[in-house]
Amino acid sequence: MSQSSSFVRPKVPGPLTIIGLDAVHFFVGNLSRARRFYQNRLDFDEVAQSTVDTSHRDQMESVVFQAGDARLMFSAPLAGSSRAARYLRRHPDSAAELIVRVRDLDRAYDVLQARDATLITERLETQTESGPARFFVIATPLGDTNITFLERSDGPFVPPGFRVTGTARAKNPLGISGIDHITSNMRVLRPWIDFLRDMLDFQPYWNVAFHTNDLRPDMKTGTGLRSKVMWEPYSGLKFANNEPLRPHFEKSQIAIFCADNQGPGMQHVALSLPNICEAVAELRRRSIEFLSTPGTYYDALPERLARQGVPAVREPMAELRRLGIQADGNQDGYLLQIFMKDAALYYQDPSAGPFFLELIQREGARSFGEGNFRALFEAIEREQTGENKYPAQ
C-alpha cells in the first residue's frame, strides 16, 4: 500500500481549467423509480428537467436531483432510437457520463485536441435559464462512459435544453453535502489510469492491492483487487479505480461487476455528510438496505485503529456496530463509511444494474483505508455468492 505524500491544492487550475464536477449522468429504464428513491428516500431535490422540445428532440426524458453540491442527472428513453435506449440495449441502468465544469472551454478544447482526445462533438453554444453555456463531449476508455466539458455562468446548474423546476434546500435533511469520490471497475486498469493522467492531468493519490488469501491462505476460491485512486488537485476530484487480481480473476467481484454491467463502468458514488450515524439510522427507518459487515470486523476494529495510529473516534463503537458503519484512518484522522446494496439487489431486478451509493464522513482522514477497502470487497462478494443474490430473470 502507498499513498501520495502531497494533498496540497494549487492556487490556479491546470491546463484544462477544470474547476469541479457538475453532475453524474445516468441512463435508466424507469425514471419514476429513480424519482422515488432519490427524492423520497434520500431527500434529494429536483432542480431541473428537460424541456418538452428537448425531450422530443432527444427522445428521452431527463431530470436533475441535487443534495448539497451533489448533482445526479437521470435520463430515460422515450423511443428506441434515443441515446438512452441504445445505451440500455447494451447495459443495465448505469452512470454513463461525467459533466465536468471548466473555466475556459476553448483552452480545454485546444489542449485535448492537441493530446489527440477522441472528440464526439465540436464546441457547442447554448442559452440556459442560468445564462450562456458552452460544451463539448469526448469519449473515454471506460467503456461507453463519456465526459462532457461545460463552461457556464455562476449560479444554479441547468444543463443545456433544461428548465428550472425547483431549488435545492440550503441543507439536505440527511446532511448530504457533496460527492467525495467516484469508484469505477474494469477488467484492465492501465488504459483508464493512463487516460486520467495523460489526457486529464490527474495525479496518483493512493493505491492498494490485496487478496483474500493474504489472511486466509487455505481458501480455494478467494479473490482480490488492485486499486488506484487518481485526483485532479485544483478541483479535488477523486476517482478510485479497480481491476481484479489473480488467482480466480474471473470470480472476483470486480470481474462480476463488469459482467453484470456488460462492461466497465462506475461502480459507486460516495456522498459526503457530517453525521453518518444520524443519516444511517434514519435511512434504516426508511428501509434502505446496506451491505452487511460481520461482527468479527468490529471485534478487531479498536486494535486495528490503534495500530494505525488513528486518533480517538468520537462515535461509540457500539453505535457503529449497531448501524453497520465501518471506520478507518491514519495519523491525520479517521473516516466513517457505509455502502448501500446495489440497485439490482435492492430492487430484485438485474436491469437496475450493479451501481450503488456510499455514505462517508471524514474527520481529518483524506485517503482511503485499506481495511475498509477489504471489508467492502468481501461484503460485495458475500452478496454476489450468498442467499441475498437476486434471482435469475
Image (tube, rainbow, N blue to C red):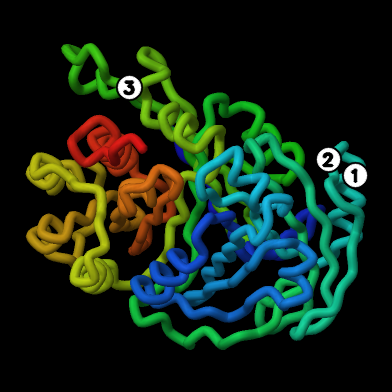
Give the numbered dot on residue 117. 2
Residue 198 in the image: x percent, y percent? Answer: 74, 37
Position of the C terminus, as image quadrant, is top left
Which residue is pictured at 61% across the width and 85% down the height? Answer: 165
**Dot 1 amino acid type:** Gln
- 319 shown above or below 48: above
Position of the N terminus, as image quadrant, is top left
Give whichever of 243, 355 is nearer the camera.
355
Q: Is residue 138 left or right of residue 268?
A: right
Give the numbered dot on residue 223. 3
Residue 297 in the image: x percent, y percent? Answer: 14, 42
In three-dimensional space, the C-alpha distance between marks 3 and 2, rounded to whole angstroms, equals 35 Å
Q: Is residue 166 visible?
A: yes
Residue 40 in the image: x percent, y percent? Answer: 37, 76
Contact (Cβ within 8 Å) of mark 2 with mark 1:
yes
In three-dimensional space, the C-alpha distance between marks 2 and 1, rounded to whole angstroms, equals 6 Å
